[in-house]
Structure formats: C-alpha cells, structure tokens
Amino acid sequence: MKSYAKLTSGLIGAWFALILTLSALHVFKVRPSQPPLPFGIAALTPIVAFLVWFAASPAFRQFTLSLSPQVLTIVQSWRIAGFVFVVLAAYGLLPLAFAMPAGWGDIAIGATAPLVALKLANPSHRTSFIVWQLLGIADLVTAVTMGTLAGIIDPHGIPTTAMTVLPMSLIPTFAVPLFFILHIISIAHARQWPAQQGQPASQPLPLQAL
C-alpha cells in the first residue's frame, strides 16, 4: 500500500507540474470561436486513465478503496473557492451563464462537504452519501458543459477567456478531474458498505491516512 501511496502522490505531482507548464505556455488558450479541445483532452485523460487502472489492477483498486471516504469528502471543501467565479462574473470577466451555476454549485458542495464527511460517511447513511457524491459530479459536469456552451449561447457576450490562462486554467484542467476522481472513489467505497453493517451504525468509518 505504501508503494501505491508514493506512486500516486508522485503521479499527482507530475500531473500538476505538466498542467502548470502547459498553462504557462498558453496551450489551453483558444479563441472564443474555437472548440476547447485542449481543455477536453486535459480534463478527460486523467479520468479515463484512472478508470482503466482501477478496473484493470486489483492491487490499485484495493489501495484506492483503502482511502478514507471521510478524508476524500473533506477535500471537496476546497470547492467553496467557487465564489471566485461569481466575483469574476460581477466584474464582467466571465459570462453569467457559466459563472453562476458553476460558482454557486461549487459553493454548495464545498460548504456541505465537512457535514457530509462527519455525518453521512457511514453505512447507515449509504444512500444519502452516494446522492451527495452524485450531486458533486453533476455540478462538475454542469460547469464544464456551460463553460463550453457559453460562447454558443451568447456569441457576442463575455467570453470564458479568463478560464484559459493562469491561474484559472488550473481549475478545469487539474482541479475538476481530480475532484471527479475523488467522487468516484467515494462512491465505490460506499457501494461496499452493506458488507460492513456489523459496525455500529451511529459511528462513522475510521479515518485512514491518504
């Protein structure tokens, strides 16, 4: 397990460094009239790679399912920083059609993450926990979709150019796929819970180190 922990930490660090470098080189900067293909590739590649690895490697799957769903859910608290979208929209730097659902959705998920981690991350609240994770995924999908369609909805409106350069470019290319993967792991973890019903239902699962 320790080897997988080191490998995973190294891969995440290398992934962040790569995205940061590509952002600094303006690889993700596209014209409003162009499809955001670089964003799509950057966002989908790590998710697909994780799903393939998770499905093909029992050892990696065992490692990911050993992670604490409480800790993974608390990490989602960072999404409260979605208020930045709302602020940028207020200053006319992002289109409202994208910033409002993306910003307020992230704020809602980030604000409720600690409560969900402490109260719902146990077998007795399995359904509620999974529903919250699915809502978190829906928020990410909605944000990416509206960011892609904003220029089509209002071709002459405010573009999403701010999202294509640092530091905002790190959100769709690194943070979004990372949070998506954490949701997937949490749901996979929760699906195992019926076999753990022997534990007292009123107590959360024990925290485990990442």
Image: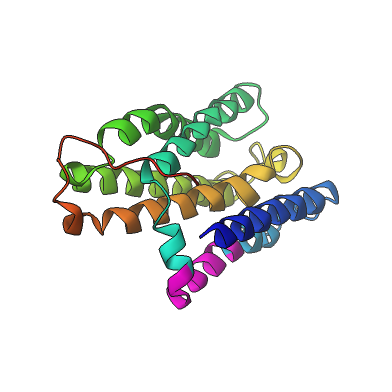
Residue depicted at x 50% and y 45% = 143
Residue 114 at x, y percent in the picture:
38, 29
Residue depicted at x 63% and y 60% = 7
Residue depicted at x 76% and y 51% = 17
Residue 64 in the figure: left or right of residue 83: left
Residue 149 seen by the camera = no
Residue 20 at x, y percent in the picture:
77, 48
Pick whichever, 94 or 1, lies toward us. Answer: 1
- Looking at the image, residue 174 lies above or below residue 83: below
Question: Majority secondary structure of the magenta segment?
Answer: helix
Pick whichever, 15 or 92, lies toward us. Answer: 15
Residue range in magenta is 45-59
Residue 110 seen by the camera = yes
- Looking at the image, residue 33 lies above or below residue 175: below
Pick whichever, 86 or 8, lies toward us. Answer: 8
Quarter of the view holding residue 104: top left
Which residue, as the protein is rendered here, is positioned at the far front?
2
Residue 95 covered by magenta stretch? no
Residue 22 in the figure: left or right of residue 136: right
Residue 124 in the figure: left or right of residue 122: left
